[in-house]
């Protein structure tokens, strides 16, 4: 049992969690996800897109965003990564077995694209801050 009140413990845990999630780490994950997206677009037979926002641009937007938007962006990027990793692995496996990956790759691309636009829309510069 702790000698600290629950509110103080919660605040300490929150501070520790945020300290392990610097903006630069999130920006690096963003770039890693986009490297997977480049492979995905090739599997989906889509033209390479112009970068929407690289890690540096995302980091700048995150620094200007409120704390709750940064936390939500972190969760959303984790969610995107959670769909991309197994999705790309499955598409690679299907390709290695000689299967057609066009339809599932395009479906995964649409999911990625919608999720990415959600992140950018939520932390974008034109977003009004509401707490």
Image (spheres, helix red, strand yellow):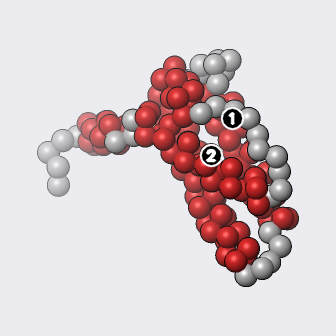
- Residue drawn at (17%, 55%), measured in percent from left and top? 1
Is 6 situated left or right of 2 in this image? right
The image shows residue 121, relative to residue 47, as above or below, that is: above
SS for callout 2: helix
The label on residue 34 is 2
Question: Please, what secondary structure does the residue beneath circle 1 have?
Answer: loop
Spatial distance from mark 2 to mark 1, Cα to Cα?
9 Å
User: Which residue is at the front of the view, 119 or 88?
Assistant: 88
The answer to which of 76 and 131 lies nearer the viewer is 76
> Which image quarter: residue 77?
top right
In percent of width and height, residue 111 lies at 74, 52
Residue behind mark 1: 51
Tag shown at residue 10? none
Res. 79 visible in picture: no
x and y, in percent, of residue 92 in the image: 67, 70
Seen at 83% across and 51% down, the residue is 46
Q: Position of residue 61 (x, y in %)?
A: 56, 24
Q: Which one is nearer the viewer's eye here, 47 or 75?
A: 47
Q: Is residue 20 above or below residue 57?
A: below
The answer to which quarter of the image holds residue 115 is top right
Whether residue 20 appears in this view of the structure is yes
Residue visible at 57% across and 27% down in the picture: 57
Among all residues in the image, which is located at the extreme left?
Answer: 3
Residue sitting nearer the eye, 44 or 115: 44
The answer to whether mark 2 and mark 1 are in CB contact below 8 A is yes
Screen quadrant of the C terminus: top right
Q: Position of residue 33 (x, y in %)?
A: 59, 49
Is 20 located above or below residue 86 in the figure? above
Q: How many residues crowd mark 2 within 10 Å: few (<14), some (14–19), many (20+)?
A: many
Horizontal side, residue 65 vs residue 86: left or right: left
Give whichever of discs 2 and 1 has the lower sequence position. 2
Neighbourhood count class around disc 1 (C-alpha, 10 Å): few under 14, some 14–19, many 20 upward: few
């Amino acid at each position: 049992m702790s000698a600290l009140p629950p509110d103080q413990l919660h605040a300490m845990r929150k501070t520790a969690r945020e300290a392990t999630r610097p903006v630069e780490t999130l920006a690096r994950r963003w770039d890693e996800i986009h490297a997977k997206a480049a492979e995905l677009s090739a599997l989906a037979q889509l033209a390479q897109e112009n970068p929407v926002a690289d890690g540096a641009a995302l980091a700048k937007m995150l620094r200007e965003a409120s704390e709750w938007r940064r936390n939500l962006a972190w969760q959303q990027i984790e969610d995107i990564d959670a769909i991309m990793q197994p999705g790309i692995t499955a598409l690679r496996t299907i390709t290695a077995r000689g299967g057609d990956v066009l339809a599932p790759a395009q479906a995964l691309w649409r999911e990625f694209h919608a999720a990415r636009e959600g992140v950018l829309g939520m932390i974008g510069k034109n977003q009004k801050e509401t707490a």
